[in-house]
Amino acid sequence: MRGSLRSMTVALGVAGFASAADAQTLNMMKSLDAPHYDAQRTTWSPTADIVNMVQDTLVALDWDGKTVIPYLAEAWKVSEDGRLYTFKLRKDVTFCSGKKLTADDVVYSFNRLKSPDIKAPFGWRAGDIKELRAPDPYTVEYELKEPFSELLLQLTMFTNVIHNKENVETLGKDYGIKGLDGTGPWCFVSWQPRTEIVLKRHEAYRWGPSMYQNKGPVKFEKLSIKIVPEDSARVAAMQGGQFDFTHQFPLQFIQQAQKAPNLLVQEAQPVFQLVYYGFKISRPMVSDRRVRQAMSIAINRAEIAKGIYLGNAVPAITFVDPAAPDFNPETQSVVKEDIELAKRLLDEAGWKMGADGIREKDGIKLAPKVYYTQVANFGRTSEAIQGYLRKIGVDWRIVGYDSTIAPAKMAEQDYELWTVAVPYLSAGELMNLYFDSKNIPTPNRMNWQDPQTDAWLKLGRGALSDADRAKYYGLVQKRVADEFLWIPVINANMYQVTNKKLKGARPHMLYQNTFYKGLDLSF
């Protein structure tokens, strides 16, 4: 492997990849490009990292992954009924175009987000907005129809960055493609799809959040981000010193990077990123809770974490990471791996072992169809679980699809299970997104329709105290865990890898991207 990576490094150099020798340019790689860079029209994490470099949010998320700190809004207050947030904006902020930021830009941005023309898939992150008002140029009154207990936390997300109305209307359908104006530390220069994004320093930027020592501007004139889809190619390029920085580093190469004398590997802490298999409980084969429980307790998560993820993941025995806000510790005792119990549960559910070692019921084999996307470790993980479940008489029929067609195949609804890796900020976010009946058929692909769950979710969203929010979201966690609606498998680690000559790098956990603003970076 070492020799092949060395030869690949040479090949990449011949292909014209930039050298990291230019002290005025920061050279970065990432594995995936995005269809566009309009934050309001996507859930795509490859859009999020670029947007966070160019555009800013009202508030920022500190390194601990849970503390909300001032950013474009230097202060705020919340009404007693939790429906009105009053934000005081900084008065020294300008867009890359030179236009001064005012409250009108904030009002415009959120009105655009809730517009039916945008069809914003993450619009819920801004709460159920009733009205936004700008009583003066630096005050925003943000009124909700009903309280949203996680509004400030969700306002840190890329979906809620502030846009320049003039730039949006000038570019029209090309907004986020041919241009993108923002108040961030980097300014958009150009984008060559599937090849390179080029950004430049925002010279006027002086309003970095308190999590950074340097409040701006950044210390590089230019940021070049190359798209390099092949995992081994990114590893080779980093080892060869051709790039300064990459995130979402392939987990199978982490140990190799840790041994490289010129590379620094840092793990994002905390990071909430669950790999799970979900049951479409409306399908007869997996409608029985006992069948779902049997599959969940028959697999060996520790072996998967060690053998497939090479120790770069933690076995997940519940849906929510124990370090995540509002985690319910009672759910840790729900999943207990036990092959003999799994067999008894299937017997009780009427699935009898056939002569071929596969269980049957009413002439039907217990052979659920399982969809996965052909990226990362989904294929190998699915095959490993398939092997475990054969031992209890379950025959997973796994089907892999390329990432370009997997969403369309899932939309057809013709499967019993599917798998994804989901990043989230809190227990409440995960529960609301996946288990609210209004989100059927997606992302509530389980088709879980439970009035009690919906009622608790509404009470959690509208809670006016941390204790009440944790109480109701805790009840939801226990309810859906007890029903075994998912098979939680692992909580995946996330790393950034940098050249050791790059100083001040620190990985952020926000939405699968370790690069946030880059204000402290220097050679």
Image (cartoon, rainbow, N blue to C red):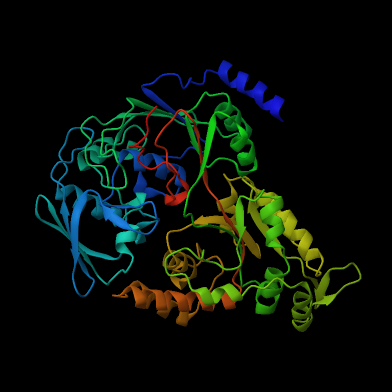
Image location (x, y in percent) of residue 374: 64, 46
Q: Residue at x 56, y 18 (%)?
A: 13
Q: Looking at the picture, how far across and down is residue 312, in whole percent? A: 61, 50
Work out whether residue 441 or residue 147 is closer to the camera in this orientation and state it.
Answer: 147
In the depicted view, which residue is nearer to us: 288 or 276? 276
Toward the right, the furthest residue is: 355
Give the answer, above or below, for where 16 lies relative to 286.
Answer: above
For this orientation, the residue located farthest to the left is: 136
Q: Is residue 86 above or below residue 329?
A: above
Name the residue located 26 percent from the left edge and 31 percent from the top edge.
202
Front-most of 246 and 134? 246
On the picture, is 171 further left or further right than 35?
left
For the C terminus, the image quarter is: top left
Q: Quadrant of residue 429?
A: bottom left
- The x, y position of residue 464, in whole percent, is 28, 75
Q: Is residue 80 visible?
A: yes
Left or right of 415? Residue 443 is left
Q: In the depicted view, which residue is nearer to us: 43 or 256?
A: 256
Q: Is residue 43 in view?
A: no
Residue that lies at the very extreme toward the top in this rendered image = 14
Reply above or below: 304 against 130.
above
Q: Compared to 239, does 83 lie above or below?
A: below
Residue 29: x %, y % from top left: 49, 32
Q: Quadrant of the N terminus?
A: top right
